[in-house]
Amino acid sequence: MKLKVNNLGAIKEGEIDLSQKFIVFCGPNGTGKTYLSYVIYGLLKRRLHIQGSEVFAEKLINEKEAVLEIDFEKLFQYRNNMISTVESSLDELFGIGDSDIKKLFGDFHCEFTIGNEDFKHYIVDTAFEDGSKLQGVQVKISKESGSTQLRVSILNDAIPNDSIRGLKFLLDSYIYNYLATHPIGNVEIFPVERNSIYTFSKELSVRKQEALDNVLLLMDKEKKVDRFDLYFRNNYKYPLPIRIGLETADNLVNLKKKECQFLPFSSFVEEKLLHGRVQVSNEGEIQFRPSQSLRTTLPIQMTASVVKTLSSLDLYLKHIAAINDLIIIDEPEINLHPDNQIMVARMLVRLMNSGFRVLLSTHSDYIVREINNMVMMSHRGSKVVKGLLASETYTENDYINPEDLGVYYFNYSSSRSKQVKVEKVKVGMSGFSVKSIDTTIESQNKIAEELYYGIKYDDKE
């Protein structure tokens, strides 16, 4: 799945291959990496509604299994609607008004670069089996290679009556969204603001803010507001990733009731990085119990910055994560000491090798170097690799095959240029290099050497 964007803020053009399992955005500040991450998130996060087949839904509900012939015209239209929806809803995505949208993104355009026929061949040739919960019902989708048919099954022994109507309404939308975004399942984003979302979630609550705004509108005698219109009023005070993060914070009491299969990764975060346990109180408050004092329970605002930064990732791994999720994380190095940056890089690689997809944006030389180590660790026949595995420096899941790694460099073509070009970076047997990081380190080393030897010889004189 390749996505091409044009005129996204400072970005003149760029093409990203979203089918790669591990994607790295790098380059100087202010070159549009977050903008593009948000567009990818907005494109994949929304599930569009399409009219479903009543006959198919009834058969599935009554017999617990049904075969669906893929309607490729409907699938192509769904993909077109994904593009048009993200292009027309940048106000919601970025949380800004129409005037700013026109100024910053007036000529924005995006498209899938794979054509309809090529995409059809891809779907037909691909075999898959996957499942998800829909309206409280466990639904499984499977397809054989070369087939144009899907086998859809319900795994529940009984379907609750209150789930039947929702299942009928959402079933086709779920199926065609699954096909349109394959091989990516759900998408989860951890923006740079993640260290504040849980800390200030009560003050920033989306529901409270909307309620307050509506009350103020109703009290304004100069404005005639229809109470019914308020129900459908869009209030985009926050960018979509922040808004959904706040909604998740509002729903922690319910989320904590579910435990997913990736608790070992949560334990890794807590033991190796946080040195304590993140928990949710009965009132939905985030709390932290440090390992050095398990009887002490700290509110999130009293914890170290590393806890604030990684608590959202920890809770995602405990209660939300699912195979084929795309994890987008902006600057995973925020607030982390170098040794912890390295550990986060290893964990993200292990998640990839456990069935997830990862897209990260980074300025950290430590993270880049560790990813390069993971590329070299893919040479399993090497004696040094075997030695590192035997010494338990690395685990069997600490590697990236070069073909699974996509690296993109964002930068202006010159100091006078006003537009950013996104270039795909070559990944070799030893990984990749980031020009802006390498140049900065070389310059710093050169100055250090000049100072050291100059002072040393000056002292002798």
Image (cartoon, grey):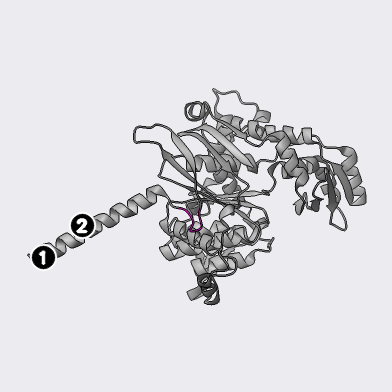
72 relative to 258 in the view: left or right? right
Point out which mark residue 459 bears.
Answer: 1
Q: Residue at x 91, y 45 (%)?
A: 59
Helix, strand or loop for disc 2: helix
Name the amino acid, label 2: Glu
Helix, strand or loop for disc 1: helix
What's the distance in space between the residues labelled 2 and 1, CA to CA? 14 Å
Can residue 103 be spotted in the picture? Answer: yes
Quadrant location of the N terminus in the rendered image: top right
Say if the magenta span includes residue 444.
Answer: no
Point out which mark residue 180 bears.
Answer: none
First-in-chain label (2 vs 1)? 2
Q: Residue at x 64, y 33 (%)?
A: 83
415 relative to 17 in the view: left or right? left
Q: Nearer the viewer, residue 267 or 235?
A: 267
Q: Within the image, what quadrant is residue 156 found in? A: bottom right
Quadrant location of the C terminus in the rendered image: bottom left
Q: Position of residue 258 (x, y in %)?
A: 69, 60
Q: Is residue 390 above or below residue 93?
A: below
Which contiguous range is marked in magenta?
428-432
118 relative to 66 in the view: left or right? left
Q: Is residue 25 above or below residue 377?
A: above
Q: Position of residue 255 (x, y in %)?
A: 66, 57
Q: Within the image, what quadrant is residue 4 found in? A: top right
Can residue 296 be spotted in the picture? Answer: no
Q: Nearer the viewer, residue 26 or 42?
A: 26
Q: Position of residue 139 (x, y in %)?
A: 80, 52
Point out which mark residue 450 bears.
Answer: 2
Say if the magenta span includes residue 429.
Answer: yes
Q: Nearer the viewer, residue 419 or 119?
A: 119
Q: Is residue 68 above or below residue 273?
A: above
Name the amino acid, label 1: Asp
